[in-house]
Amino acid sequence: MRFTFPHFTPEPEFIQPDYDKWTAVRVGMSRDETTALLGPPLDDRYRGGKSSPTDPYYSYGFLQMPMVPHPRTYAFLIGFGSDGKVFTKMDPFNGRFSVDGSPTVPEIIIPADETVFSHYPRIVDCRWFPSSGVYPITYTFELGVKEDRGDRYLDEALDSDLPIPFFMTHFSGAQRGRFRVRARNRIGQSDWSVYHHFKFTV
């Protein structure tokens, strides 16, 4: 018997709006003003299929990665209130956009810096906002373990070709650790993210 993960996508899709036009959309704009900038919204089967003039949200793109918790985890959405005016904008990058197509520096979400864990086994789920830029983008994940004495960390790149913005790892011991991430595409490579530190007590 063969099992397949329901949200596995062997051929990822990356549809992004023009960044300059996207950032020009402001809260309070009408639907007509929005579509004058961005054009008609996408017909997205994950958001009800064919778009209509009364939809509460207009979709203008998405990052369909090889495996994500939900098929539209990373989307470009504009929300309209009952008055037909923009009240919210959501994008996968937390509002940070590439200016030349090269990937932006990843911004870590979890674990928060200096998190203390007391669970066993020592599984750590590390996630970050996707980098903005020309897709596809891959990530290098580096994990460090603090030595028993002193302030030195032993750092190692555990994966240098991640196609998704998260990594789960089994940490080695009841001690301090840290991790950071950088992104790469066909144009170039980002700087490393800031370190996030954590500690296991068991």
Image: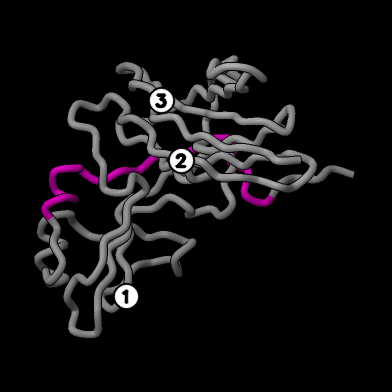
What's the CA distance linking mark 3 and mark 2? 11 Å
Q: Which residue is mark 1?
A: 56
Query: Residue 85 in magenta?
Result: no
Q: Which residues are magenta?
A: 6-24
Which numbered tag is attached to residue 128?
2
**Quick check: 41 left or right of 5?**
left
Place residue 189 in its image quadrant. Answer: top left
Place of residue 128 in the rendered image (x, y in percent of width and height, measured from the top left) = 46, 40
**Near-viewer residue (125 or 46):** 125
Upstream in sequence: badge 3 or badge 2: 2
Q: At 26% across and 48% down in the image, what residue appears?
A: 95
Query: For the residue marked with disc 3, what is the amino acid?
Result: Ala
Task: Examine the rendered structure and indicate whether residue 8 appears above or below residue 77.
Answer: above
- Residue 65 horizontal/vertical position (percent): 51, 40
Could you tell me which quadrant the N terminus lies in? top right
Q: Along the horizontal axis of the image, is 130 left or right of 26?
A: right
In the rendered image, the vertical position of residue 140 relative to residue 48, given as above or below:
above
Q: Is residue 48 depicted above or below 176 in this figure?
A: below
- Which residue appears farthest toward the bottom when viewing the image? 82
Q: Nearer the viewer, mark 1 or mark 2?
A: 2
- Residue occupied by mark 3: 183
x, y percent for residue 106: 38, 33
Q: Quadrant of residue 192?
A: top left
User: Which secondary structure, mark 1?
Assistant: loop
Residue type pointed to by label 2: Trp
Residue appearing at x 39%, y 29% in the figure: 193
Q: Is residue 33 left or right of residue 91?
A: left
Q: Position of residue 86 (x, y in %)?
A: 19, 70
Residue 78 as seen in the image, left or right of residue 139? left
Q: Please state, as top left, top right, bottom left or bottom right, where the C terminus lies in the image.
A: top right
Q: Nearer the viewer, mark 1 or mark 3?
A: 3
Is 61 placed above or below 139 here?
below
